Amino acid sequence: MSDDGAVGEERPVLSVRNLVKHFPITEGVLRREVGRVRAVDGISFDVYPGETLGLVGESGCGKSTAALSLLRLEEPTDGEVSYRGESVTDYDSGELKAFRREAQMIFQDPTSSFDPRMPVGQSVAEPLLVHGMADRRRRRGIVENLLERVGLSASDYDRYPHEFSGGQKQRIAIARALVVNPDLVVADEPVSALDVSVQAEILGLLEDVQDEFGLSILFISHDMAVVREVCDRVAVMYLGEIVETGPTVDIFEEPQHPYTRALLASVPSIDPRRRGEGVELSGDVPSPSNPPAGCRFHTRCPEIIQPEGYDFDQQNWRAVMDLRVRLEQGTLDLDAAREFAVAEGEATDPEAVTREELARAVRDEFSIPPELTDHRAERVLQDALSSLVDGEADAARDLLADEFETICEREHPDLRDTEAGHPAACHLHREAVEADAVRSQTPED
Amino acid sequence: MATESGDPERFEDVDWDELGGLAVPRRTLAFVASLVAYALLLGYDYLLVAEDQPTIPVAGWNVTAVDWLFLLTLLAIVFYGVVPLVVNRRLTVHYWHQFRKNRAAVVSLVYLLVIFVVGTVGTAFIEPPQLDTLAAYQPPVYSSVPADVPVSCAGEVVDGRCQGTWAHPFGTTGQGKDILKMVVFGMEVSMQVGLIATFITIVLATAVGTTAAYLGGYVDEVLMRYVDIQLTFPTFFLYLLLVYLFGGSLFLLILIFGLTGWGAIARLVRSEALQRSEEEFVRAAKGAGASTPYVIWRHLVPNVSNTVITAATLLIPSLILAEAALSFLGLGDPTVPSWGRVIADGRGDLSSAWWISTIPGFFLFFTILAFNFLGDALRDALDPRQEGGE
Amino acid sequence: MSGNDSATPDAARDATSDATLDATDREGRNPLLSVRDLRVRFRTEEGVVRAVDGVSFDVYPGETVCLVGESGSGKTVTGEAITRLVKSPPGEIEGEVVFDGQNLSDLSEKQLRKIRGGRIGHIFQNPQNALNPVYTVGWQVAEAVRLHTDASRKEARERAIDLLDQVGIPEAAARYGDYPHEFSGGQKQRVVVAQALAANPDLLIADEPTTALDVTIQAQILRLLADLREEFGMAVLLVTHDLSVVAEVADRVVVVYAGKVMESGDVYNIFEDPAHPYTRALLDCLPGRGGETRGIPGRLPDPTNPPDGCRFHPRCPHALPECREGAQPPLYEVADDHEVSCVYYDGSHDPTAITGEASSRPSFPDGGGGGGVSDRANVRPDDSREDEDDE
Amino acid sequence: MYWYVARRLAWAFVATFIILTITFLLLEVTPDAQAAQLQFQAAQGGGSAEAAREAYETRRGLDAPLWERYSNYMINVFTLEWGWSDTRSQPVVEAILDAYPYSLMYGIPAVLISTVVGIAIGLYSATHQYTLADYAGTFVAFFGISIPNFWFGIILLLVFAVELGWVPVLFDPNVPVFSVANAKQLVLPVFVLTTAAIASEMRYARAEALEYVNAEFVKTAKAKGADGRRILTRHILRPALVPLSTILVGDLLGLILTTSYLVEVVFGIPGLGRLSLDAILNQDTALVLGTTFIPVLIAVIGNLLQDLAYTILDPRIDYGDR
């Protein structure tokens, strides 16, 4: 696809600033809002002419919602989307309809993206009809020609979706997106439902049409291997936010955010001689209706910054942090820990579990070693655990929160430039850059 | 035109600014035209023709309110049932292959077509059954009763038993009405009740269901709460109460059935439409710039139609049965020869003239059975979950 | 992860000498599972679908074998046919499945139930649907325990909590009473794994256990499986379409296409010296492999009417006239523990037409042949049986 | 959960209220047949039709303003002051109390039998799909759904009472409840009622069970080593009960109520249905309303129970919604 160098000189085709999409959670007949799912929470990026920008992240990170909102298939809650300098968010219905000719979408699921009751030809011709091409023979001519150009035959016009394989349907979906001659195509996981052998075909076709028509593509995917193959630049999303963005090569060679690193590390290598090298990310993605404070990744981050004045083994620090996260959530269940101690054979009866055994069970639960190497930290932990086993979970929580406070839970990191040259949103880089700045200043002073 | 230069037109050559036509499908135009004609005729009948005068003097046919509704129903069936089947031949063939697997349903379809044709066309050619006390209690052909049962035996009397004749193949009632004719006229009643009320139901249910699903919010809430209440009321007792309050003319009965029975289907349509409107093809249509009415009409309605057709096919027999039951209870329209009424009439003569209650009952039973078979087969053939199956 | 050599205590267990075993490895160990000429047919309205059409492979104790294929290759049905989970009718299973010396095809349904969930555990693809929504996860794991042991209710509960903890459910005891919908996809899959492990199985059949999950969760589950395998010394038969998963966990690989085995062998052989044109094409499709091909042209054959000869010949760039007739070519041995069903390897053709210059795959600079790692020979006397009765 | 139950109860109350209001309004807009008859009689007798109407209205309290009549009506409904039945010369409530035991006599056995048998056949059918038994079951279901039960009753009477004489033609309300004679005369009504109900239940049970027969978790259960019976009862029936509970209460109730009406007419059982029909035929408005309220009330309660059953049976239900 296009060279990385082309980026930056031209004006972006699409420019997204602080895009926000929240879904209210309502209750009852009166639809009282009791919370909101922060699916997309202030993301910004640009798509330049002819380039492919990858938007990657795990399911539930908001990447599909972002796509729908920026095309206004869902109304964005807040933020600004501009297309060639015009504000998409301010379009009235007429302008929006015209915009629909410029920006098209390709969907993930080839089975559900076609109306089962409509011949595929008609589905492809639909945008023409909607935009006022009343002559059906003309529509048919254009679509038949287009079907042939995406590798199908003109006679497929009258066939129904169920008569096609997944790969063929995705070809037709590309035809439908192309038929209004758009400049921008948003492809939401276009190949993730397909077999590998078919994936390669579809990606190839997408590349061909991009070259032929100079399309800009926003490519949404969870599959890092595919992204590496097709994207010029990549933006990594976690829980509704972009945590890192940059040229594909840089992101893959020098990932700056711990989440990106973890994401890349969890992609299984296709070389059987290099297995098991990855860092494993613990836990699940937190719910976007109640995202963690500070850095949203701090609840899972393996590189979470240690509290000042203590010296942990990083793994143990993560374990202690897991305990803290659970205490904050208030979901730590001591009775369960007792029962677990019984199941582990430490005691015979949940009632008979001693305080020490209980504390040990809690440590086990979070894989915290029997003794931390930093004695001060160990003392704090012991105090907290004894409060905990005495049933004073709040006291334990507060003690740990006071003593082991980390910047990651306190402050929300912004996207800032890193040494690698592309921005990432991580406190590690604040320190690094500051330290860098300090270091570079010292000799002069 | 696209082929002026001999080369097919390519999408990238389209000049979008010159476009802007409003494309109305031909079928819609034709349907609107026939609706206009229908409205003109209706106006003529109600404004210009006196009530007791036949609307069409040549045929001597005084078109009743029920007939008008029936005409409208048939019109809708032709334009939105028959025409699409003919136009979308590939899909029709696909569904037919699915449907054909169920032999009972194919037989049912043939049976129902016969009932439908005889009931609608046949009644125009035969005289309505007439009161004829002399011909009372004639047994059906190939059967016999003691000679003292009929007032006067129309056939031969052999060994003191009156033999049935082809003059009254199904025998006659205690009033001497020919049961075959009663059965044929009963077909008309059943078809009218079943089809018209179902037609009204479908229109209401689809409109309410798709609207509620697509608009959501308060519209959805209010409509569905109304449906909740309507469904709480047991249908049969609602009919009873309304028939008691408003009287049991066939026209009213049909209206009551049609206007009160759409709740369950509307719920079905709504949930189906909700699912469908989440699907990507609806997004794709929106993404192409389509308007809300376009999406509802071109995508949601066709896609819930399978559900609607199946539900409707299963609704028809229950309506026919309800009408028969009401007539049986003596709460139906006394002026129409409903099967239920004939069954009730024969009840008193069960021991002497078994055929009066039995024969119309068989027709009622088989008609309902056929509709049930049909509905079941349609459900299998049209099941959207199977549609993706390669 | 070098589990293929780790001797397991179960290996010698009741493997009687007179059992119907037709393959042993070089160390004299018998395969734990030996599948011979497995066929599964489904009678449908469109005709007889031959989902699995003569598949043979072995799984040795403690090793991970991956059954790889695209959708429609019959890999899932193969996995389910082993303990006859395939619904019958409409399915019909033929062929021989020998598990630890017992021919499963001869067992009664009752005896088979002891095996299922007892000595052979199963994991299915979609964790969303694999748990019964109306029971607590604890109940479901405890049920698996109680079905195969005579544990009391209380013991089963304790064992279930223990299992849930082992598969990495945080606060297992507290979550015992939660319903499946209260768990995330990854955690559900952990619960499913816990169920499968309830009776310490010797073999775990995992059908696409990570396909429905995110990459980060996928890595967790794969790690879990590897850890458990090491801990329990069980063998794993992993059914998957994802070659990266294969590269991550497999000891040996069986490549299936349209109900037939195309190639099987040591994972290094398969990835570094793929012999069959299909395997090569599949590997070339992988993003990041730097392959030149763009997918595999053509489509899967119609399962009701598969082509004569090699199933892959209509899409094969190297197809010869003889590929188009007769039965699927037999499995020719091309190296130690590496065999391939392709006529180029019958001795009279030049396989370099397929493999190009010897065995150098550009993407693995350090990858040599199969030397060193694989020490398993294959002595399989009746491999050629496969081509005899192909109706 | 309690909050949900409370709200659901409130909704049942509101629904009843709305239904009663609608009924009231319907009564208001329709001409009163009895008044018309009195007027007609008065006019025929040479009196003033107007005066007769006024006298009638005063007697009935119909001259009061609309709002007052409405509140009176509501109060009466909720205090069980359901008026006086002219044709039976007794309070409506009393007439209903006299009649309902006859309805229960055949209704309860029919509900019990049809529920158990219907679900059992349905489950068997679903787990033995495409076998002869399944086809037979399906055939029975179609037969039961399609046969007009009033006609079926007549045919049965013709065969078993008239021709064979096994059961009495006429229902005798005076035989003791627990006696052979009573059982004999109840056999046919129960049979007719169960045929319809079994058919509908087995159809639903089969359809619902089929949803689960091929479910992944059933395969998982099988892979765990569970036997057929365990799979059927624990893994198929239990989840199927969730939707079934809805159908059981909702549809079964509607079916039983309707069918019982016709059955009572056909077999001459002096139960609620018969009472209602007589009231309709004799234009006894108070009694018509009273006998229609009963099934409506049962339906409202049934709906309530069905929703509550759902919440108990399905752990996934979101109490926050609805």
Image (spheres, coloured by chain):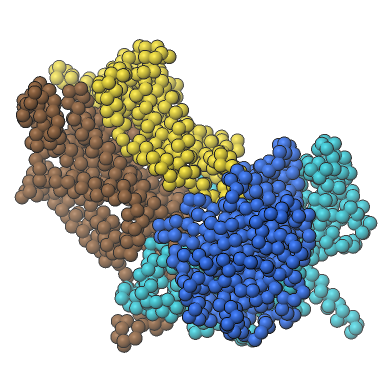
> Above or below — where is D118 with respect to C389?
above
- For residue D275, what is the image quadrant? top left
> Above or below — where is B179 with respect to C5?
above
Judge from the rendering whether residue C172 lies leftward or rightward of residue D148; answer left or right.
right
> Above or below — where is D195 with respect to C322?
above
Instruction: State how many labels appear.
Output: 0
Chain D is which colour? yellow
Chain B is which colour? brown
- For residue A431, what is the image quadrant? bottom right
Name the residue nearer the viewer: A345 or B339. Answer: A345
Among all residues in the image, which is located at the extreme bottom? B5
**Residue A193 visible in the picture:** no
Instruction: Find residue B127 and report its horizontal and vertical position in percent.
Output: 9, 40
Residue at x-position 90% and y-position 62%: A311
Instruction: Find residue A207 and report its horizontal and vertical position in percent.
Output: 54, 80
Judge from the rendering whether residue D111 lies leftward or rightward of residue C155; answer left or right.
left
Instruction: Find residue B338 and report its horizontal and vertical position in percent.
Output: 20, 36
Instruction: Find residue B39 and report its horizontal and vertical position in percent.
Output: 19, 54
- For residue C3, what is the image quadrant? bottom right
Chain C is which colour? blue
**Residue C327 visible in the picture:** yes
